[in-house]
Image: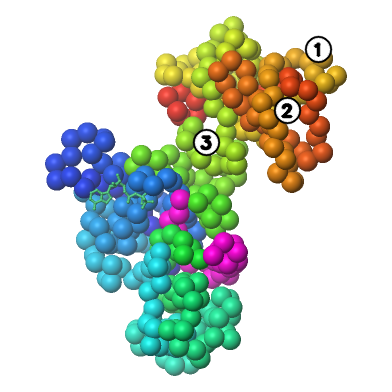
Amino acid sequence: MARIDLKGLAHSYFPDPKTDEDYALRRMEHVWEDGGAYALLGPSGCGKTTLLNIISGLLTPSHGQVLFDGKDVTNLAPEERNIAQVFQFPVIYDTMTVYENLAFPLRNRGVDAKRVDARVREIAGMLDLTGKLKQKARGLGADEKQTISLGRGLVRDDVSAILFDEPLTVIDPHLKWVLRRKLKEIHNKLRPTMVYVTHDQVEALTFADKVVVMYGGKVVQLGTPQELFENPAHTFVGYFIGSPGMNIMDCKIDDGAAWVDGQRIGLSDRLLEAVSKQTGKIELGIRPEFLTLETGDAAKGSDGVDVNIIKVEDLGQYKIATTRFGASEIKVKLGEDEQVVGQSGVLRFAPEWTKLYADSQLVA
Ligand SMILES: Nc1ncnc2c1ncn2[C@@H]1O[C@H](COP(=O)(O)OP(=O)(O)OP(=O)(O)O)[C@@H](O)[C@H]1O
């Protein structure tokens, strides 16, 4: 498997791009480690497929290079890049058995029969296909066919990388959950370099060691699921990752604190110092998990932000309270046993988890 270097990569579908907006992929510089599991995550149109197609060789970038283990592959066709690909819809041979389908990528490269057999059985075992090896693919359902496609993508152990383009789209929700876990297990066991495109954060966060969050043709953050949760580098990451996402509000910095709709929110000295050097639009962000809502007697004399409580949703293992002050609507995650009394309360912001953003970028 290979390390992937993306050097000064950018792509425009226009012949003569002039502004940043003309680029589907804005200039990027990344090193993706050998054996890593990377998810490309972002909303429709953010450039995920464009980037994947450049890595696979379906598309030649307008600028920059793609290197596999230091070798420039930018101008090589997909079949010259030694990669495996799994697409949204099954790519299998209906007239072949499941075994023959799984064996195909190996036989095609002249791998000896003993090795083919061992590898097909190993992958079939991992994907729960062992009992179906002798069946013709024709009679199988869409889920099973796509599982075979995954198997065909995983069966070779000599590829530089395995590229997945939304591979679980056609799979039913329960099996999707199972296959996500299986892919993760397979990755832990075999350590191939995997690149996985998805617009589903749950899929990205379960599958990947590193998530590449894309927005408007740019990689706005590349980090572990924990880094994306704890320290979103961009307001989009805060908002897009998490359920519900980060609360983000316009704020002003004055008198040693942040002010949102006339209410004071304390900040650490480190953050105050860092924000004093910023000139852009300042926003304050905090995840619902890092807010405390006090109501009833507990709220009396409490030092925090006064809020109205709009609603409380009980989601089984936790509750989500929607609160409001001024123009800001703020969500708070509460424990399943936490009681909310009345329709007003006091919100406390944990200073260590209160973030500031200048023109959408994390400050400090
Ligand atoms: N062949 C093309 N010609 C012109 N513009 C294109 C082409 N393919 C994609 N684009 C544009 O490039 C941008 C990025 O598209 P891309 O398909 O890479 O995004 P995506 O994140 O994969 O979206 P989706 O999840 O909907 O597939 C979009 O604005 C899209 O309209």
The disc placed on residue 239 is 3
Q: Decide whether residue 179 is among the magenta residues.
A: yes
Which residue is drawn at the image coordinates 57% and 37% (left, top)?
245
**Residue projecting furthest to the top:** 255
What residue does disc 1 label? Answer: 301
Please tell me which of labels 3 and 2 falls first in the chain. 3
Up-down: is 298 above or below 76? above
Q: Where is residue 168 in the image (x, y as percent from the top left)?
A: 48, 63
Please tell me which of labels 2 and 1 falls first in the chain. 2
**Residue projecting furthest to the bottom:** 113
Camera-nearest residue between 253 and 271: 253
Quadrant (top left, top right, bottom left, bottom right) of the N terminus = bottom left
Check mark 1 vs ligand 1: CB closer than 8 Å? yes or no.
Answer: no
Task: Answer with the quarter of the image where residue 88 lies.
Answer: bottom left
Task: Answer with the quarter of the image where residue 298 lies.
Answer: top right
Q: Distance between the residues labelled 2 and 1?
A: 15 Å
Up-down: is 94 above or below 315? below
Q: What residue type is labelled 3?
A: Tyr
Camera-nearest residue between 76 and 132: 132
